[in-house]
Amino acid sequence: MAEGRALRADARRNREAIVAAARDVFDRDEQLRFDDFAARAGVGVGTLYRHFPTREALAAAVYEGEVAALCDEARDPARSAAENLAALLRAFVEYVVAHGGLARTLAAVVDPAVQADGGNALESTVADLLTRAAGDGTIRDDVPVGAVMIVLHGIGSATDRPHWASEARAAVELLLAGLRAA
Amino acid sequence: MAEGRALRADARRNREAIVAAARDVFDRDEQLRFDDFAARAGVGVGTLYRHFPTREALAAAVYEGEVAALCDEARDPARSAAENLAALLRAFVEYVVAHGGLARTLAAVVDPAVQADGGNALESTVADLLTRAAGDGTIRDDVPVGAVMIVLHGIGSATDRPHWASEARAAVELLLAGLRAA
DNA sequence: CAAGATATGGAGACGGTCTCCACTTGTCAA
DNA sequence: TTGACAAGTGGAGACCGTCTCCATATCTTG
């Protein structure tokens, strides 16, 4: 996804408007068809398609922005890696609790294979914390990042269970307990 | 979904043929459109729609059958509840490893809210084992079933991560370790 | 301020989903 | 067995969301 060329000014504005509109729509959990979607962002369908050829591409763009904010909160140098990891995972749940629709859409639409492929900020942040905490001896050292990501994915995609919020919190605590166990 | 009326013999045959065909298609991970789908089962589209108004209804029917088999394996009276629970969770992963397409389809299509609503054999089996194992004192007693289900859901829906099989196994071990921890 | 490059929008082709009903098949009472 | 009614069927075609295509509009650069 490297920028091959600089976007023309108006194109960039449109692109941003689309992402913003998408964020909004996903968050409200509105089920909009692609055409209306374009209208909502104030552009034509053609423009929407040029910038984001698939629904997934659009979701990925939103995803990227959301995740970046989350990761920043987990880089407090005053805390140990294990503490930062716990903070990140808990923040993740609270974020998802606050933005259920967004989380569900992203979990449903963003392809795990793509995410796992490297470009994923959340995964590499978790991987980093995991490695460093394991180095400290504060958590087990035999846990692949993927195992943690799988749990997070489950949390993001099960948002319409009746008591989901408390279950999600419990799942994270379970995960943290598992990480600490010998 | 109580049977309001007994199905006519031919109708029942058709219904079963459809479910069997669906199982097959999902398992192979073929992306079939509804019409061809009906043809595959040897019935008309109309028939398909009468029996299963939505893709989800169809997936749910397949799901039910698959899960019933799994749960039976976890009712060994010679083992403790905790052991049966561990066996069930591990069997779940191995099942999903062997039938990735099926698992992904079901995870993507079957609505968690419906599953959680009661009619779900897997969830009630897990709930039962969880309660009994907690009674024995072999695992923590503050874990809602939902937390475990969320992890299982994550496992089922992340099947296209590159090293997914080993990550899924690790996730289950992590979960089991978390359950054991004080 | 040209002239070329870049981006736009939305009409309409395309294709999957789902409905509807004339027809077939099963069931059951006589 | 058979007639008569209920139950079930199939697939043509209406419907509607997705996506392409290109004449037009807008930027940018020399």
Image: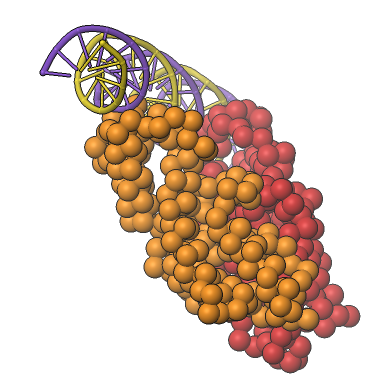
Chain colours: A red, B orange, C yellow, D purple
Residue A21, x across and y down, in percent: 69, 38
Residue A128 in the figure: left or right of residue B4:
right
Residue A139 in the figure: left or right of residue C30:
right
Q: Is residue B36 above or below residue A138?
A: above
Residue B71 in the figure: left or right of residue A31:
left
Taking the spot 65% from the left edge, 62% from the top edge, the residue there is B127
Q: Nearer the viewer, residue A74 or B86?
A: B86
Residue B170 found in image quarter: bottom right
Residue A111, x across and y down, in percent: 52, 57
Residue A92 in the figure: left or right of residue B17:
right
Q: Nearer the viewer, residue D16 or B133?
A: B133
Residue B110, x across and y down, in percent: 53, 47
Q: Is residue B23 above or below residue A123?
A: above
Residue A170 found in image quarter: bottom right
Taking the spot 62% from the left edge, 54% from the top edge, the residue there is A157
**Residue reaching furthest to the right:** A78
Q: Is residue A58 visible?
A: no
Quarter containing the C terminus of chain B:
bottom right
Residue B133, x across and y down, in percent: 68, 74
Q: Nearer the viewer, residue A156 or A40?
A: A156
Q: Is residue A151 above or below residue B64?
A: below
Taking the spot 61% from the left edge, 86% from the top edge, the residue there is A142
Q: Nearer the viewer, residue B154 or A48?
A: B154
Taking the spot 45% from the left edge, 71% from the top edge, the residue there is B94
